[in-house]
Amino acid sequence: MPVGTVAAADDSLLTRAAEAYRSETLFYQPQNRDASLSGQQWQTLWRRTRENGVDTLIVQWTQYGEETFGGADGWLSSALVDAERQGLELIIGLYQDPEYYETLPDNARFRHYWYQQLAKAHARQQQIQRQWPLTPVGWYLPEELDDWLFREPGVRQELTRQLASASQQLTGPLHLSMFSGGFVTPGVYAAWAEDITESGWQVWWQDDEGARNLDPPMRQGYRDALSCRIGVVREAFARTSATESDFQAMPARPRQRGSDCHPDAVFSLRYMPWAEALRQGPPGALAQ
């Protein structure tokens, strides 16, 4: 085979691979080990992120339990200031309770627990607005929703009621994400996502291509049931840990972006080919 033909074929493969990662919206999950990056490394990372077509960065959280990543004058705040200087718009994540999945599904405590989490989200938003030198274009609630924790209709209804109330208290636009475990039908799941959207939130659905909780036909069934208003988060990782174990994953090419009507995002920056600096060194705390 002529050398030129081989090169052309390789270029085509590389182009298709690059296109799989391309999205206007990208998630970033802060981890403690990221504090080791220098200012120059952050600037390079954000520049390359912009060069790869990203306009908006969804920062998954700015507080994880007692961990605030240095606060208003810390490394995370400084890195996000650099991101804005490189032209990225920021959707800022709020407070994540490390005990979220251990506390739920305690339905007896659910109503009060969620009230507490939304109150902490409100307090965190006000703190960032007062103290952090950022100009966010939106806000993200880190607690992810799924159809196992919220499989009972009454619990889903109470959650939606509280989210609607919170949307009147929090400064918008507001975002949250969901994933599917196959515990309710696609139709019920899609209707739930639509109810949350109506309550004042942009809903993002995680496509399960990396987590692999569902088999492919079921995964596609949930995707097909969603309305056009629900965003799709394409997972750019492959899970390497067992379902019962602590989550571990490696970078993997996400599913090719579809030609459908859904808003598109990719999870996450750490798995991107140009983000090698975020994958160096030991995983440390908050590793996913």
Image (cartoon, rainbow, N blue to C red):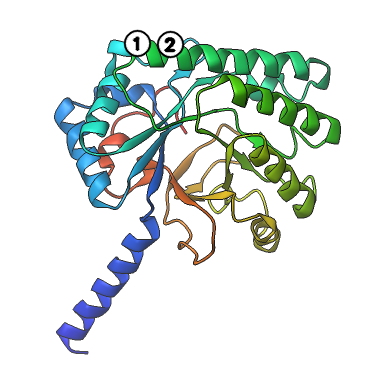
Disc 1 target residue: 131
Q: Position of residue 64 (x, y in %)?
A: 49, 18
Indicate the quadrant where residue 285 lies.
top left
Indicate the quadrant where residue 110 lies.
top right
Q: Nearer the viewer, residue 153 or 239?
A: 153
Q: Are marks 1 and 2 in contact (CB under 8 Å)?
A: yes
Residue drawn 62% across the image and 17% down it: 117
Measure the alpha-carbon separation of dots 1 and 2. 6 Å
Left or right of 55 on screen, residue 108: right
What is the secondary structure assignment of the residue under circle 2?
A: helix
Residue drawn 22% across the image and 29% down it: 82
Q: Give the residue at the far front of this rendering.
A: 168
Q: Nearer the viewer, residue 9 or 96?
A: 96
For the question of whether residue 34 can be seen, the reply is yes
For badge 1, the amino acid type reads: Gln
Q: Is residue 250 above or below residue 104?
A: below
Left or right of 281 on screen, residue 233: right
Question: Could you classify mark 2 by the number of other residues whose Cα lies within 10 Å: few (under 14), some (14-19), or many (20 or more)?
Answer: some
Q: Position of residue 183 (x, y in %)?
A: 78, 45
Disc 2 target residue: 127
Q: Position of residue 98 (x, y in %)?
A: 57, 19
For badge 2, the amino acid type reads: Gln
Residue drawn 14% across the image and 31% down it: 40
Question: Could you classify mark 1 by the number of other residues whose Cα lies within 10 Å: few (under 14), some (14-19), or many (20 or more)?
Answer: few
Q: Position of residue 6 (x, y in %)?
A: 22, 81
For the question of whether residue 244 can be seen, the reply is no
Residue drawn 84% across the image and 36% down it: 153
